[in-house]
Image (spheres, helix red, strand yellow):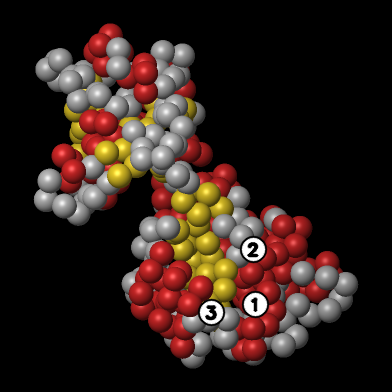
């Protein structure tokens, strides 16, 4: 409670003495999505509402199903108020139904999420682009089992993106020189740490936000620019590899904080804050690093960041 009172007082001073939560009565229910980036964002939102805003927010344990969260925001009954990490176009059905359709869900300005193939930056002079991957001498550098093919980490067995990268390597004409490694994320992270510590070649898929970008110096592989017809994928078909083609860079995802518009009457200051929060992917990477790699308590990470970045927080609130 000392933390809440201190930050609330600080915010009141920075906002000219007014209480930023003068009309804030409703408790705000925040989603409990399972990936680390979403958890980090959720705890930061909670720390701001409970701290400098002087209101009340709870992270509802187990509230992790996107469809359930969206339906709760639509109802406006407080069962679900904040969807902390809404990826578009991945969640287009939710967007079409509640943001564009019913207009019961609002959102902030998004930050970008990327999906790329990477090498450690000490390899970047040799491996800059897809064209470099077509060179047998480059593939040989990444051949870990001496079978004549270089390995790349495509992702976990259960991910759609794992299939996507296999389609991409086929479409780029790389199948004769490269083969995918399909491993759990935690297993791969162990391999990545070992390879970088020894400055060994390693080629791998990754995305933002994630803590590897904060922990390591890595460089994305350049892919051809997008053009009409370059992406035609159906990853759910039985013959997904043969039926799909993807020979260009992936579009960035747009990642939003979404909220129930019922907060505009139930808790107007919080609704205003959620519409104005502007997340920086590099900062989110740092939160994920501390929570995901360093195993720090997410509430402690969030409260410390808010305490150290009140100028940014006040901009979001005011």
Above or below, 195 relative to 8: above
Which residue appears at 15% of the width and 20% of the height?
145
Instruction: Give the mark, 2 or 3, whose residue is nearer the N terminus.
Output: 3
The local secondary structure at tag 2 comes to loop
Instruction: Give the mark, 1 or 3, whose residue is nearer the N terminus.
Output: 3
| Depth order, front residue of 63/10 | 63
Q: Position of residue 56 (x, y in %)?
A: 59, 81
Q: Give the Cα distance between marks 2 and 3.
A: 20 Å
**Quadrant of residue 194 in the image?**
top left
The local secondary structure at tag 1 comes to helix
Image quarter of the N terminus:
bottom right
Above or below, 119 relative to 55: above
Q: Give the Cα distance between marks 2 and 1.
A: 10 Å
Q: Position of residue 147 (x, y in %)?
A: 12, 17
**Mark 1 packing: few (<14 Cα in 10 Å), some, or many (20+)?**
many
Image quarter of the C terminus:
bottom right
Q: Position of residue 104 (x, y in %)?
A: 53, 81
Instruction: Give the mark, 2 or 1, whose residue is nearer the N terminus.
Output: 1
Specify the label residue 277 is tagged with.
2
The answer to the question of whether label 2 and label 1 lie on touching residues, with beta carbons closer than 8 A, is: no
Which residue in the protein does label 3 denote? 103
Q: Residue furthest top?
A: 137
Q: Residue furthest right?
A: 16
Which residue in the protein does label 1 denote? 270
Which residue appears at 41% of the width and 64% of the height?
92
Query: Is residue 3 in sight in this rendering?
Result: no
Which residue appears at 36% of the width and 63% of the height?
34
């Amino acid at each position: 409670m000392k933390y809440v009172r201190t930050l609330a007082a600080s915010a009141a001073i920075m906002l000219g003495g007014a209480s930023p939560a003068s009309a804030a009565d409703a408790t705000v229910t925040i989603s409990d999505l399972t990936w680390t980036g979403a958890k980090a964002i959720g705890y930061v939102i909670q720390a701001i509402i409970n701290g400098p805003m002087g209101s009340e927010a709870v992270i509802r344990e187990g509230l992790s199903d996107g469809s359930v969260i969206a339906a709760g925001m639509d109802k406006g009954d407080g069962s679900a108020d904040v969807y902390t990490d809404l990826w578009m176009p991945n969640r287009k059905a939710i967007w079409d139904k509640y943001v564009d359709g019913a207009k019961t869900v609002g959102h902030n300005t998004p930050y970008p999420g990327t999906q790329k193939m990477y090498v450690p930056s000490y390899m970047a002079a040799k491996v800059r682009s897809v064209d470099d991957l077509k060179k047998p001498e480059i593939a040989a550098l990444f051949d870990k089992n001496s079978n004549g093919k270089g390995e790349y980490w495509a992702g976990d067995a259960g991910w759609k993106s794992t299939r996507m990268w296999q389609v991409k390597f086929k479409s780029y004409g790389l199948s004769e020189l490269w083969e995918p490694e399909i491993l759990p994320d935690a297993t791969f992270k162990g391999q990545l740490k070992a390879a970088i510590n020894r400055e060994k070649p390693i080629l791998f898929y990754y995305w933002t936000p994630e803590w590897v970008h904060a922990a390591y110096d890595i460089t994305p592989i350049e892919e051809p620019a997008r053009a009409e017809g370059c992406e035609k994928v159906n990853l759910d078909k039985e013959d997904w590899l043969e039926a799909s083609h993807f020979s260009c860079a992936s579009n960035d995802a747009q990642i939003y904080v979404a909220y129930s518009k019922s907060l505009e009457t139930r808790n107007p200051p919080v609704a205003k804050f959620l519409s104005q929060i502007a997340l920086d992917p590099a900062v989110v990477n740092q939160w994920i690093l501390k929570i995901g790699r360093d195993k720090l308590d997410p509430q402690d990470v969030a409260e410390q960041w808010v305490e150290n970045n009140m100028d940014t927080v006040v901009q979001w609130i005011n």
